[in-house]
Amino acid sequence: MRRILTAVTVTTVFSTALAACGGSGGPGGYGAVAVTEPSPVPSASGPSAVGTSPGAAMPDRIAWGPCTDIKRPDGATPRPDPRFQCGKLKVPLDYSKPDGDSLDMAVIRIQAAEPGKRLGSLVFNFGGPGASGIDTMAQSYKLFGSLNTRYDLVSFDPPGVERTAGVRCGTDREMDKYLAMDTQATNPAERAEQNRTIKNFADACERTSGKVLPYIGTVNAARSMDRLREALGDKQLNYFGISYGTQLGAVYATLFPKKVHRFMLDGPLDPSATLEQRSLAQTTAFQHSYDSFLKDCIKGPGECEVGADVSLANKHVDTFLDDLRINPLPVGDRKLTQGLAVTGIAAALYSDLTWPLLEQGLSRAFKGDGRILLYLADAYNARMPDGSYATIMSSFPAITCVDTAERPTRQELDKTEAASVKISPLFGGIGMGSICAVWPVPGSNEARKIDATGSAPIVVIGGTGDPATPYEWAPRLTSQLKTGVLVTYKGEGHGAYLSGDACVKKMTDGYLLDGKVPANGTVCPSP
């Protein structure tokens, strides 16, 4: 399992795949917002504004300017890139009151390299829910270079995400405690502490971001995306959604079927799945990816540093994680807990490019050095070196729980946990139902009802080795859309286009650039 990798390739693909985490993050599963006037600066910088503008007409254009607050995964600010343009678009906080409070939605654009052949804008959502479209686009746009020849690449921070009134759940220290929690309780005292930690987290979300919590679901995000389409001057929307971005695209197509032009949904969710179904499917998929990692690791004699065979490797990992429950591993002034170690393992499964890093991380951790596993966990949790967090691990449960009316009982949570642990002792747990059960605002099932009848064909591509969005969700979403075209990618990792597979790239570029709709049932790589 020795591979020569460039740091740029690994970092870019890894950070983009993690942005598209799609529903597995956090221990539960994989105050007031300031009211300000809209900033006059044509940039994505400045505070996340919730402005009060009764009766004000929404602007139909974006004032573009330089991007001044792009953040890299390490928290640093890169040198300004003259190709990047940023701006803000005013959208309603509550679409039932369009002339009431508003949000300044942050937007980024990278203009087409060949303006004479420009097809329009291609809007991206990279997933989460809760990933910053601003930062992810700035990090990953070169991966979409062929599409950038004829499209302006556009992305945005949806309501409740980062610069657009991003949800924050208490202090950085409170986030540290929540995310370090062990994945499973082994006795009543641990269960009580787990319940307290989750409830305190939900209370902190209400305390810090309560004003926006009821309004940041996927249905409102889709409506805001249609405002963005209008502001860009496009009659129909061209869209590339990855992971959770597939649900956002499906909801948009349900609300605005005649506004759909070319839609690519990569690494799809099944919006109709219950919280329990989602938890069990993802647990199965992560275990499958982990098994694939181990098989790849041991395929050469003496190569795998985790164990000489699968049985021994599993024994080493299980023993290590059990030890962490009692004695977390010191890493500088922090500690690698069992929960953080499992997060680090899961993070490395999002791309097979990071499998060698996982092997190295586990090997070193067995010897008392937990730095790599903690780095992987921090990258997944969007924790910066200074201890601050991006909003994704707060936005993620906030959007997820608003998008469902489910509020599971303790008995239902116990049933989910028992079933998932039976599937995978490593990745099993209570799932997102634990946080939704105590979420401070009610949810709705509207974002789970998909029917794009009347739209143009929508391409849905699922990967057979995807750990975060199991392949079984791809045919289900295709069926729900009514206008979907299913493509299967036979490979590892989260997001088929990010894999670099030549067949996937040719098919995707042919569809988005030339309008060549693939045949339903297309398989990549070609048999």
Image: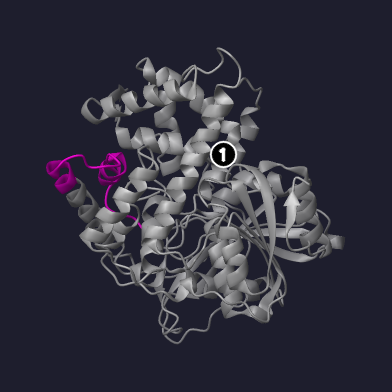
Q: Amino acid at mark 1?
A: Phe
Which is nearer the eye, 272 or 50? 272
Q: Residue furthest right?
A: 116
Q: Is residue 309 above or below residue 161?
A: above
Horizontal relation, residue 163 to residue 177: left or right: right
Horizontal relation, residue 167 to residue 84: left or right: left
- Residue placed at 29% from the left, 49% from the top? 418
**What kind of colouring is applied to the model shown?**
one colour
Find out whether residue 190 is within the magenta segment: yes
- Residue placed at 71% from the left, 49% from the top? 144
Q: Which residue is mark 1?
A: 14
Q: Secondary structure at mark 1?
A: helix
- The percent position of residue 152, horizontal first and vertical second, equals 72, 60
Q: Residue furthest top?
A: 302
- Residue placed at 61% from the left, 79% from the top? 256
- The percent position of residue 267, horizontal first and vertical second, equals 59, 54
Which is nearer the eye, 323 or 112? 323
Residue 156 seen in this snapshot = no
Find out whether residue 238 is within the magenta segment: no
- Residue placed at 40% from the left, 62% from the top? 400
Q: Magenta residues?
A: 167-193
The quarter of the picture where the C terminus appears is: top right
